[in-house]
Image (tube, rainbow, N blue to C red):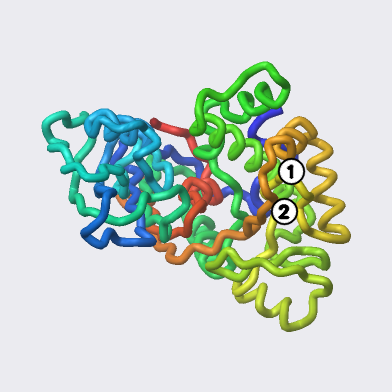
Amino acid sequence: MSADPGTAPLWPWAIPLRARIKVLPEDFVVDEIAATEPDGAGEHVWLHIRKIGLNSEAVAEWLARVAGVPRVNVGYAGRKDRHAVTTQWFSVQLPGREEPDWSQQVLDGVEVVASRRHSRKLKTGHLGGNRFRVRLREVAGDHAAADALLEGMRLRGLPDYFGEQRFGHGNLERAQAWFAGRLRPRGRNQRSLYLSAARAAIFNAVLRRRVQDGSWDRLLPGDLANLDGSGSVFPVAAVDEELRARCERMDLHPTGPLWGRGGPGSAGAVLDLENAVAHDWPELAQGLEREGLAPARRPLRLRPRRLDWHWESGDSLVLEMELGPGEYATGVAGAIAALTDGG
């Protein structure tokens, strides 16, 4: 099976445009929003790094080499694209040591913007979100329809699929091979990538079903509802007028499963749907359960914190947005345009 499960459309609308994305690294600019600023003291050096043409893991490995520490001593909050210009924080644990002169072993495509001490390691997921500036080139199609669709997404959100970054180059296939006993991950990072890809495939398949039946942006009995902007969820036994109104104004969102041991936590028809998807992907669901992952939930709907756009030179569209952790700018762009990757 592929990382694009099911046969239902990705979106509940027609895609009005065709375009190229990431033709140049400068077409995809990402600035990480820190959840915590370094306080100036402690055994961890936090480095604010701008990179181009490198993924986050490559930079982490470089920092470990320069500092002469194990890779595990280096942390970052989220993986950023390689074919892009991105700015994010990294941390390097250096107890009782001065930090090295990073410029003496500079890596092509890396600029250390600032460094400060902090008492704690930067951990995966500890970020406030990301700001994006995305340029789509060679745009063809109905500009007016795209404008209307973007305005609708700004007001009503869009399905919150995991993007291609979550699947990488063959991570889902490697997860399947691992769960079947044909491969073993090399180290903690590979294990995390494979588990994330497996969870994302099941989530996307559930979301596709909800898109197909029109319930991706409304609560159903048996749902676990997410409070917008938080990790908080609560069970929905029945959908009354108050819950319906809160969902319509995007204060609440229905959620889908991040599969693990113990079941998805939903009930009724929602549980039946989620179990049916897991039945379609038994090697992934069972593999995740064997690995002992605790089940979790993710909103089915993405609500951009900010979404603006403008047209340049007739055939380029620039999207500027602010998204929360785990939300994908390529998902927003892919909702309005059939994309050809120029990277």
Q: Check disc 1 and report its element: helix, strand or loop.
A: loop
- Which residue bears the numbered disc 2? 211
- Asked whether the viewer can see residue 46, the reply is no
Relative side of 135 to 105, left or right: right
Mark 1 to mark 2 CA distance (whole Å): 8 Å
Q: Quadrant of residue 217?
A: bottom right
* Towards the viewer: 86 or 118: 118
The label shown at residue 230 is none
Residue drawn 52% across the image and 23% down it: 186
User: The N terminus appears in which quarter of the rendering?
Assistant: top right
- In the picture of the structure, the residue carrying the numbered disc 1 is 8
* Image location of residue 165, percent across then percent down: 50, 38
Looking at numbered disc 1 in the image, what kind of residue is underneath it? Ala
Percent coordinates x, y for residue 152 in the rendering: 56, 65
- Which residue is found at the position 27% from the left and 50% from the top? 43
Query: Callout 1: few (<14), some (14-19), or many (20+) C-alpha neighbours within 10 Å?
Result: some
In the rendered image, which quarter is residue 233 located in?
bottom right
Amino acid under disc 2: Val
Residue 144 seen in the figure: yes
Q: At 31% from the left edge and 45% from the top edge, which residue is drawn? A: 90
- Position of residue 139 relative to residue 237, above or below, is above
The residue lying toward the viewer, choosing from 141 and 104, is: 104
Question: Relative to 40, is 176 on the left or the right?
Answer: right
Q: From the viewer's side, name the closer residue of 231 and 97.
A: 97
Q: Position of residue 123 (x, y in %)?
A: 42, 49
Rate crowding at label 2 as few (under 14), some (14 to 19) or many (20 or more) other CA atoms within 10 Å.
Answer: many
> Looking at this view, is 211 or 183 the one in front?
183
Contact, mark 1 vs mark 2 (Cβ under 8 Å): yes
The mark nearer the N terminus, 1 or 2, is 1
Q: SS class of the residue under badge 2? A: helix
- Residue at the spot 76% in from the left edge and 82% down from the top edge: 241
Q: Position of residue 312 (x, y in %)?
A: 32, 52
